[in-house]
Amino acid sequence: MFQTILVTGGCGYIGSHTVVELLTKGYHVIIIDNLCNASIIVLEHIKQIVGVEAFARLKYYELDVSQVETIFMTYSITAVIHFAALKAVGQSVSEPLLYYDNNITRTITLLQVMKKYHCYQLVFSSSATVYGTPETVPVTESSPTRVTNPYGRTKLMIEEIVRDVCDADPNWNVCILRYFNPIGAHITGLLGENPLGTPNNIMPYIQQVAVGRLPLLTIYGNDYDTVDGTGVRDYIHVVDLALGHLCALDYVLAIVDRILDPLHLGYQVYNLGTGKGHSVMELIRMFEQVSGVVIPYTVGERRKGDIACVYADTSKAERELGWIATRTLGEMCRDAWRWQKMYPQGL
């Protein structure tokens, strides 16, 4: 019997890349997305990448997560990969109630519906934001959590809710994926990060400066205790990240099929990153190298809450999920630039 995976937020940046990998591997996929942060055009691009035959295994519904029971009433869902969320840190500070309602309330609805229909397999999209300002690097899954904004707080609260659900009911099998800084695009150039409005993340900002949509990049702080004074982050290629979701899905499904030791049942947290840190200036210089475009920039004051250096310890994901990021910073920049050249104004 075929396995059907529900992907919430599957038209978004990370979700769409994960859907490509799911279809490539032979899964049946159902996407729900309310398109508040995505474009319906993404579906046609997925079709071009995977081909007509694989695309026939995909169904799409323009639904909010609050309406998810409609899907469970119609289909037998094997597992859920939950991406759908609002994710702009700045907006979360100015509109915290919007974030708590959207991210937490809707996840609770999803969990309630999953339980009602006896679907207990979940891969949840969390974030390294939950670590806040780490005391030491690299950051491990057991590092203290100390969120600094409402967005990160919603992610951590959801993690805690899911942990309580798993503690209360041993049927649940959940992988929480805390990922670091996704950048890059699909190698075809057909999928990439397509922010609506001014980008919140550095790579799409660099890309839009490169094609002339924005005049220059602001580097927030160049006096950190790092190799060149700019902040250091763990950048990971979005395709490596998507493949991490497939490894996590394989893990929870192997538990269900009793392939894995029963001691692995329940709730697990994994960092997804490269385990290497690169500074903002290193990222800019690499992008300039692969694109041939000079990125004009100015240096501004440090932003409140920004930290000097953070990168992941990914040994647990490698050991237990069999996953490791393989793509280099140069490949991340090259693929991001290919996407932006193909779609200079976005989708």
Image (tube, rainbow, N blue to C red):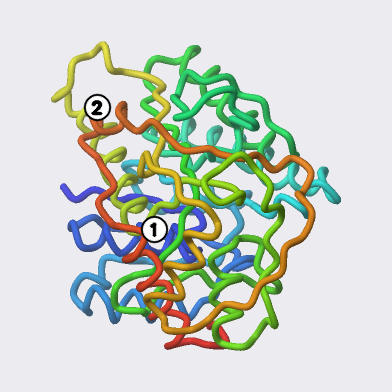
Residue 20 % position (x, y): 30, 64
Residue 60 % position (x, y): 43, 67
- Determine which residue is flagged by label 2: 320
Q: Which amino acid does label 1 sit on?
A: Val
In the picture, residue 280 is in which quadrant? bottom right
- Name which residue lies at 79% across and 54% down: 301
120 on left or right of 113 = left
Residue 75 % position (x, y): 37, 51
50 on left or right of 16 = left
- In the structure shown, which secondary structural element does the residue marked by tag 2 occupy? helix
Residue 7 % position (x, y): 42, 53
- In the structure shown, which secondary structural element does the residue marked by tag 1 occupy? helix
In the picture, residue 274 is in which quadrant? top left
88 on left or right of 163 = right
83 over 142 or under it: above or below? below
- Determine which residue is flagged by label 1: 238
Q: What residue type is labelled 2?
A: Glu
